[in-house]
Image (spheres, grey):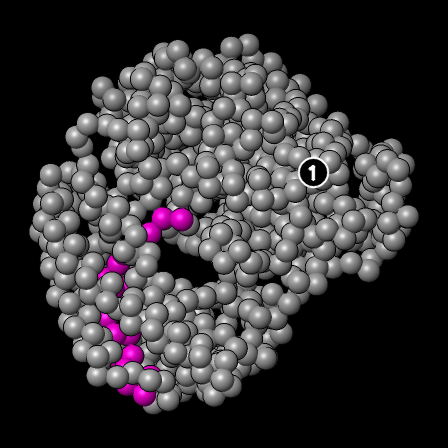
Amino acid sequence: MADIIPIDPITAVFGQSGALSRAFPGYKPREGQVSFARACHDTLSNGCALLCDAPCGTGKSLAYLTPAILRAIQRGERVIIATANIALQEQLVTKDLPSLKTTLSPLIGDNWRFALLKGRSNYACLSLVHDPAQREEWSSALSDSELSDLRRVDAWAQRTETGDRSEMPFVVSDNVWRMRSMDRDDCHGKSCEHYDGCFARKAHERANNAAVVVVNYHLLFAHIAMRAETGRDVILPEFHALIMDEAHEAGDIAREFFGHTLSKGRVDRVEKWAREARRKAIAAGVECDDADARELTGAADGIMDASKAFFTACDEIMRPLTERKINTLRSDATACKPALDALSGLIDPLTIARRVAMRLHARVKRMERDGVATKHALRVQRDAERAGRVCIKALSWMEDALKPRGGESTESDSDTLDAIHWINTSVSRTGKTRYTWESRHVDLSSVLYSHVWQATRAVIACSATMTTGNGDKGWTWIKRQLGAPHTARVLSVPSPFDFAKQALLCLPQNAPDVKEDRGAFDSFVLDTLLRIARAAGGRTLGLFTSERMVKDAGQHLRTAVNMSEDDFSCVMILTQGDLPRSQLVSEFKRDETSVLCGTASLWTGVDVQGHACICVLIDKLPFAPPGDPVMDALCERAVKRTGQTFAGFMEESLPRAVLALRQGVGRLIRSVDDWGCVVICDPRLTSKGYGAEIVRARGMPTRTRSVSEACEWLRRGVRAMGSASDISNASNARGAVNG
């Protein structure tokens, strides 16, 4: 098959008479797409590193998938595609890869496979489906409607081929799904009586037989962690090339994955294991003597007492803070000392539990070697392994958290900000306050460099928002975030869109100062949103930096709709929280006279082409909220590294805000036929020195300072939509604006 691949495969696929033009009438090569595809081909062929900023409309998925497929077929080297979330995974597997398989078949045939692989908890567990005891145990905690959903899941699990939650023809709550799914720590592996039919195992088999495997970042990092621990490819099959899509999110996802959360639930699980371990071991024929029993009992009692003391201390410390809207407290705060003292009480019992777990694990291993280990004994081994793993991780983070800080700095402890720890407060859906002990690495660049870039023959990282500015300086933040080598090639692909013609950027004059008068600023934003939405006839996406503003915007717009006696009275107002995110976006697409207001998750991944979205309003620059422990630590680290007072803001806070802003602005123009207006109300874009740099960044359209002018521009465009046959006619009807 390798002989069929032409000498210049990129031209053979993307050229004027290439495979894509033959498969899709009207296809025209895009300069950016071709240059990115060629760079990917070179990277995969030569075994090196590439970072690419490929704006929306580039067609980056086809640009990296095509060389990846050709390389996998030609050299028999598996390629892993990692994305930020499951939705992107499914888009690649259900749309892009099947289309390419058909398109490329004249060149390479169709005797190759691709596969989608998710984490174990995304697949139904047949052990839980068929275990009536577990079903009975959980039924008391479920409502009648949840019990009904649970029965539907059980029936579906017995007829589905994949067991993949996303393929269920109905929707159930996360609470119900957890009853029928199992993560890796709980899985009994080969000792499970349903091992042969296991959906997760079958998914791994499909991945093992595929040339291209699509995963998300959580699964990639789980694989990296296990490979670092065991030296083997346990979670993902062996691969020679890695492509990271939406790579700007990879660093934060890695920080979350390699961090640790100590909750009451996790502590209780270890305590429960310690109380039941001896009984289960003896029942399974595993040696567990009186000394083991005493240690297990002592460990269980110690864990219970220390856990109660710790979470009581958390409540006493955090309750007055939460009344002041403060939900986190760093471990280095003086007020945290009672919680740290209580936390230290967990060390001894967890150490004992870990020691006994290791002994039980070793005894079952010997039984396996002797050929006398029953499936019940293997379950004892699995439970011991899981409990030991929880203990090891918790002990590691606790010992670091309890390490004395301060004093004179030495070369060995100069990096005291490598890991941070804090108490976090959250409220459950039922209104119950929960406390967790959170731990995160501040800088994972060395981990990513060693286990991603150095460990893989060829690595490509791409996104529509990789750079924070123009020139080489614009790549600094993402390189540091991903741990990319200095030798990595960088490529900025030009946008296929004509922003000067298709879009207008409005930076309103006379916007109140965000910090000096927040009430006046919020009122200005709401009034501007209403004016813009009226001019656009709905068709507006409002992106906000707080849930409070989303709520206020929805209320403000609904009041105006109810009081209107013109066409605006028919506009539908959608706000985040009214419906699940996917339904909100679908409804926004369907109704071309609707307004959608949302926060964080709507800044990315919303792809609305056509006339349903002709205006995006952003309230202010999306800086991280004050008091975010990770962001505070990153800023402290930057100041320490550079010795510059403002380094934290310039090297961490600002780059993140710029990338998030680019993502928000990118919701407007999604195709060559789209047009519209972006309104950013934050006066810092014109009053601060860094604002001018942001405005000059890639993807920013022509500017105006007048909201009235922007409204008139929108009204002309809306009037033109009815008669205009193409974007140029609509553009001419709207007229030019000089900012």
- Magenta range is 258-282
Q: Image quadrant of residue 673?
A: top right
Using the image, determine if residue 137 lies above or below residue 12.
below
Residue plotted at (28% across, 85% down): 279
Tell me the residue at 29%/68% (across/down): 355
**Magenta region includes residue 275:** yes
Does the magenta stretch mainly form a helix, a strand or a loop? helix
Q: Which residue is mark 1?
A: 47
Residue 460 visible from this viewpoint = yes
Residue 193's place in the image compared with 586, above or below, is below
Estimate the x, y position of residue 151 in percent, counting from the top left.
45, 80
Mark 1 surroundings: few (<14), some (14-19) or many (≥20) residues within 10 A:
some
Q: Residue at x 66, y 24 (%)?
A: 494
Q: Residue at x 37, y 68 (%)?
A: 386
Label 1 residue SS: loop
Counting from the top left corner in percent of width and height, residue 717 is at: 59, 25
Q: Amino acid at mark 1?
A: Gly
Q: Nearer the viewer, residue 636 or 694?
A: 636
